[in-house]
Image (cartoon, rainbow, N blue to C red):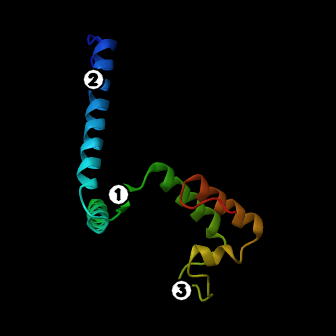
Amino acid sequence: MSETDEVRIEVVRALVACIEDAEERVREAVHDAVQEHQPSERELALMAQVIRERQRQASDRTDPSVLDVTYQTLWALARVQRIAAGWWLPPGSGVRTPPTLGALLKIVPVEVAHEIVGVLVWAGLMPPPE
């Protein structure tokens, strides 16, 4: 909307009422159509709809890319790497280190683990611990 556009409240109210009215008519039409059929037919139709919706949701998903990483996530991962760097030796160092962050969290001091988990929770990369 530009600065010169004027919002007419009565028009907005009329549009909302129109939309709500149309939604109600659709609900009633679907209800009436569904009631005309046998319960087993309604059940099969519902199952088909659920399957179609799941297929649609699956096709809407895209594989995540490193280019989808947000600044907050990138910052959190960098922070975790800085914290863990002192406990995680690089490959080829001759010392066996935990292969995953989860394994590392089991062997570092509790304060270090809490700091790492706090950053990951803050970034939304894991749920808060229970």
Quadrant in the rendering for residue 23: top left
Quick check: 61 left or right of 77?
A: left
Q: Nearer the viewer, mark 3 or mark 2?
A: 2
Q: Residue 95: image x %, image y %?
A: 63, 87
User: Could you tell me which quadrant the N terminus lies in?
Assistant: top left
Lower position in the chain sequence, tag 2 or tag 1: 2
Give the labeled residue for mark 1: 67
Q: Nearer the viewer, residue 35 or 23?
A: 35
Give the labeled residue for mark 3: 92
Number of residues whose C-alpha sits closer than 10 Å to that of mark 2, classed few (under 14), some (14–19) or many (20 or more): few
Number of residues whose C-alpha sits closer than 10 Å to that of mark 1, classed few (under 14), some (14–19) or many (20 or more): few
Q: Which mark is residue 106?
A: none
Q: Nearer the viewer, residue 61 or 15?
A: 15
Q: Is residue 32 above or below residue 18?
A: below
Dot 1 amino acid type: Leu
Give the labeled residue for mark 2: 15
Circle 2 — which element?
A: helix
Q: Is residue 60 above or below residue 107?
A: above
Dot 3 amino acid type: Gly
Dot 2 amino acid type: Leu
* Residue under the point 60% across and 57% down: 121
Q: Rounded to the nearest whole Å, what is the CA distance between mark 2 and mark 1? A: 40 Å
Quadrant in the rendering for residue 42: bottom left
| Residue 7 shows up from this direction | no
How many badges with numbers are in the image? 3
